[in-house]
Amino acid sequence: MGEGVRTALPMIVAEELCCDWRHVQVVEADLDPKYGNQLTGGSLSVRTSYETLRKAGAAAREMLISAAAIEWNVRHSECRAENGSVLHPKTSRSLPYTQLLAAAAILPPPADPPLKEQSDFQLIGKPTPRTDTPQKINGAAQFGLDVRVPGMLVASIERSPVYGGTPRSFNAAEVKSAPHVRAVFELKSAHLTHQFGETSGPGSRNYTCAGVAVVADSTWAALAARKLLKVEWNEPPSSAESTATLREKMLRLTSQPCPVIRNDGDFEKAHASAAKRIEAVYELPFLAHATMEPMNCTAHFRDGECELWAPTQVPAAAADSVAQALGIPRDRVKVHITFIGGGFGRRLIQDYAVEAALISREAGAPVQVVWTREDDIRHDFYRPAAYHAFQAGLDVRGNLVSWRHRGSSPSIETFYNGTGLSPQNAAQVDSLDFPALFISNFRLEFAVADSGMPLGYWRSVDASGNQFALSGFFDEAAHAAGRDPVEFLLATLGPSRKIDAGDDGIDVARRRAVIELAAEKSNWHQPLPAGRGRGIAAAAGWGSLVAQVAEVTCDAKKGTLRVDRIVCAIDCGFAVNPLGVRAQMEGAINFGLAQTLKSAITVTRGRIDQSNFHDYEVLRLSDAPAQIDVHIVPSTNAPGGCGEPGVPPVAPAVANAIFAATGKRLRKLPIRAEDLRSA
């Protein structure tokens, strides 16, 4: 998908295999049960594969050593593997792996092969250039849009402008008479399987968008003919929804008690007796994924079988969804996995694969479905808009004694899994263990705001928006207490200790360390000139901990803002490829700055207002920080994830820095010039 695991994962195997890295080739596997779960998402790849791949490499190494020992009639313990060969030091003999493969392949693999000590690693932990860079430079890399199959046709789809709508009538005969057009027909909606394999419950709204397919000899012919379509639509009740009506709903829900997700101590009593009380509301918009490569897929249905060429994050879900839509057995769907031009969670959803399969069956030929940028923006599965209302109380010493958080948004979990979920399971409140576990009187409430919008996971999921609200309000509490934000953050965390909180619990020492490192490397206590400010935010999740300090220059009167520098400290456990970790943090920071400064999806009459990068803005080179400093905390802990955790701290760090520079508190994303002037 682009996050660097085509380098990190083979590094793990090569290390234990003791092979020559210069001769390693990485080949993309097709979908096959023997490889287990082939999904990429949730920053899972390295942290869930590390031990398995080490054992795989070590097992192969031991089998090769055994083959050499048998060949030489010596003990296994007298031999060792090194740089793609097995050596017998006593006799100075050696055999390259290539001469041992046949003999090693018939030996039983050891169930529990010995693994190297970290101190003996020659490759893991060393900055290593990516294996896929040459292919992407010379054009050899095959992305989904690069697929060409003999006899392939191309399809473009006019989808219902309101999710859940269906075509009532359209001018099929006129469009079919256009040059090089092969077919024009209705494409009905099809239910999709859940991206992580769960079974969708009653009321699940996870389906493809109905529309009209135009199939032609080329992309140009399909797009040109599609422009001739005149479609009248049957619109669902959600056509009455707008950004304003959803905001009013969330405001109403959070203005009264909501279902309680967590309740520690006695918030009401502690808050009533607090020496100082503060409150604030934070708002976030819907967001599109806006990957550089729009959605696409190539399918060939013939003889009751379907072959896919798919840029998908979950090939098994693509096969499941296609099999269900076609009514064929799952084992009759073959999936070839291509390079992916960006995912961010969008390619967890398999609508484009199902579209291609259904159209191929109807057209009787291999078909590539190509989405335009406008299709991609207007028919995404969006990160939910959200509304967060906070109240907090401080004692006379400026310590937090009470905290209430009422949140509301549409629910991704309800969208996929249907109605009947508990409030806890429906709530969009992942990654909220701070300050929850560090304040005695804490209450978290959440109300699902029903929406007709299609929803999906966006890079860092709930934390992308939750951390903006949480870390922003936490910074407000620090200033209300008259305390330095870094000192206040560390004081609230308290002394180094381990807290039992599910999974591996919370290691407070590790959280403190990334905050202290980010503060130190950013020269936190060094004064800045007027109009400049620093802000800090931290987040934990996916097995990693991140703290970031943003440094900004802004003029509230002129409405100008420049993010000059981001300092990032990450503890991702043992860093398999530090070069990849650094690249992921840099990418995540710029990705997070897009939601901070640029991106927003708005809705009118159930329709998406935005259509392309002129009105759904992403970060430009001119907006990127001149300096991003990434500092990796040395660690011997198990590797954590790196794709997601760099995103959540960015927006609050920038907003907190703006407050430090101007005294203006901005609580709504994206932050625009007019917001800075009017705050």
Image (spheres, rainbow, N blue to C red):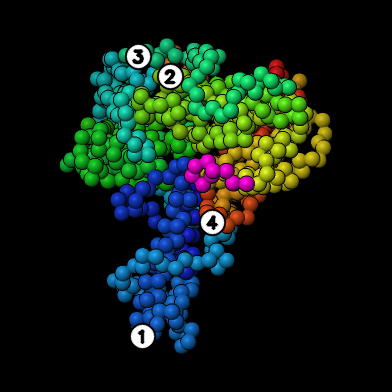
The location of residue 545, given as percent across then percent down, is 59, 44
Q: Which residues are magenta?
A: 497-505
Tell me which amino acid carries mark 2: Ser
* Residue at mark 4: 576
How much space separates mark 1 and mark 3, taking CA atoms? 78 Å
Q: Which labelled disc corresponds to residue 451?
A: 2
1 or 3: tag closer to the N-terminus: 1
Image spot of residue 343 (x, y percent): 46, 39
Q: Main secondary structure of the magenta part?
A: loop
Residue 300 in sight here: yes
User: Is residue 632 found left or right of 502 in the rendered image?
Assistant: right
| Spatial separation of the CA atoms under disc 4 and disc 2 | 42 Å
Q: Earlier in the sequence, mark 4 or mark 2?
A: 2
Q: Residue 532: x percent and y percent?
A: 77, 32
Picture disc at residue 263 = none
Count residues near mark 2 (Cα–Cα under 10 Å), then give few for <14, some for 14-19, many for 20+.
Answer: some
